[in-house]
Amino acid sequence: MAASSLLRALTRRRGCATSGAFSHYQHHLSSPFSTTSAAAAAASAGARDEAGKGFPGLGPTTKGEKARVVVLGTGWAGARVMKDLDTDGYDVVCVSPRNHMVFTPLLASTCVGTLEFRSVAEPLARIQPAMSKSPGSHFLLARCTGVDPDAHTIDCETVTDGQKDALEPWKFKVAYDKLVFACGSEALTFGIRGVTEHAIFLREVHHAQEIRRRLLLNLMLSEVPGISEDEKRKLLHCVVVGGGPTGVEFSGELSDFIMRDVKQRYAHVKDYIHVTLIEANEILSSFDVRLRQYATNQLIKSGVRLVRGIVKDVQPNKLILDNGEEVPYGLLVWSTGVGASPFVKSLPFPKSPDGRIGVDEWLRVPSVRDVYAIGDCSGFLESTGKEVLPALAQVAERQGKYLAQQLNSFMKAGGGHANSEATVDVGPPFVYKHLGSMATVGRHKALVDLRQSKESKGISIAGFVSFIIWRSAYLTRVVSWRNRFYVAINWLTTLLFGRDISRI
């Protein structure tokens, strides 16, 4: 009760107590607070009572206020749309379980100490300063649990990550003028038993931290007297499932870490540690054939064992392949692609062929007003005649940039508030042009494939020059100058002094 009172006090809008705000509130929000389908008079009385006490969350905007854009998520898509929104005309409210964006292409480097964790985490307040300066813009550490498109509200629940002394989670509502779903995706497990319980997914900073702690713990335990050779081999066997860019880059970083640092500082166990990469088909299937073969050769030279197979079962200390082979492990990293999350699947919107939120050519959810979806959680509807775009950072970022431009245009044309964009020209549809793919394979080698598709012709190179291009490209894509400086310094110190192997 105290928490709810605090939330109301902190987020009460100026106009909620005025009669104009109340009438706007009553028009849009009487139904979300009705627990049953009671008569209109009862709903109106309930709304009036709520208005008197203050809105339990963020109330609707009034005509004299800025329109409110609510963004769900802080990934590539959500961060880009918030960065480019014109905050002179919009208030921005972000609802997400994390208050930062993760620069995912460099996340694998943090697992082995090439980069520090904070070098790949971009605080949201640095991406969009209005979050910490504008009185109408907020970051809410919560997750969305439901949406009412007719009332233009979302239901939210605070996130405490199970902290013992934290406030109990409580629920609240947020009214929106424009709603942007940018809530990402989740790792695919294909229903394989034991994956969620025993594998680590390399998608968030805390995943990279867990991988690093587990890896260094196993290294230290393997030197304890009395441990058998079989137990040492199992503890120091790192298995990566999935031969996409993330799996290959992590395998390359890990093998580089083993060759350059582990074998110098853990001399007693250097011959026991090894890496296995399991893939059902070809590794890096979206790359040029020549580049795939180069990557395969480089990984083998680095000591990575490549296994073609399908995982059928994951147990606490071993996994079982489709041919019956048992693979013991001390560290298991799962990187087999992403799909729609349970939250996305539960939404009452049309879906794209792969289960994501269906959008039209302008990234709108066509069945409702003022709702958009971008990034990994969205996909073109079949009716558009377009293929669902891959779940890539460059797709999400470009969609975020496009949508911010659209919303800014709406605002300047007087269509920023709810139910007002019908009179505004929506402009040209979103068009995606692939800029190419890059991946590092360790030992200062990388792949650069600048073809627009697998069938088209274009530049594809590999080797040390590609590694320089890979590092330069990602360094320029890091959002802030602060983190660019951090990344450059981390790379330099790793080159000069090696990686830090302290288990902190």
Image: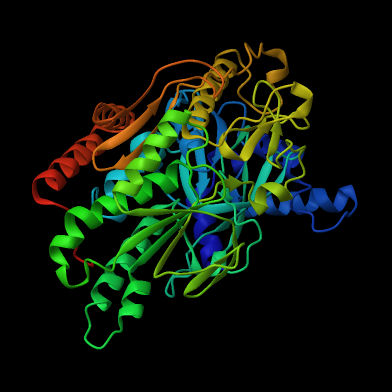
Residue 124 appears in view: no
> Residue 350: x and y, percent?
77, 37
> Residue 128: x and y, percent?
39, 34
Residue farthest to the right, as pictured: 39
Quadrant of the drawing holding the C terminus: bottom left
Above or below, comparing residue 276 to residue 404 in the picture: below
Above or below, comparing residue 270 to residue 116 in the picture: below
Residue at horizontal 14%, vertical 52%? 498
Residue at horizontal 13%, vertical 41%? 492
Residue 471 appears in view: yes
Front residue of 460 and 3: 460
**The image quarter in which residue 245 lies:** top left
Quadrant of the drawing holding the N terminus: bottom right
> Residue 60: x and y, percent?
63, 38
Q: Is residue 361 left or right of residue 11?
A: right
Residue farthest to the left, as pictured: 496
Q: Is residue 474 left or right of residue 146?
A: left
Front residue of 183 and 328: 328
Number of marks in the rendered image? 0
**The image quarter in which residue 418 lies:** top right
Residue at horizontal 52%, vertical 29%? 395
Front residue of 263 and 308: 308
Colouring = rainbow
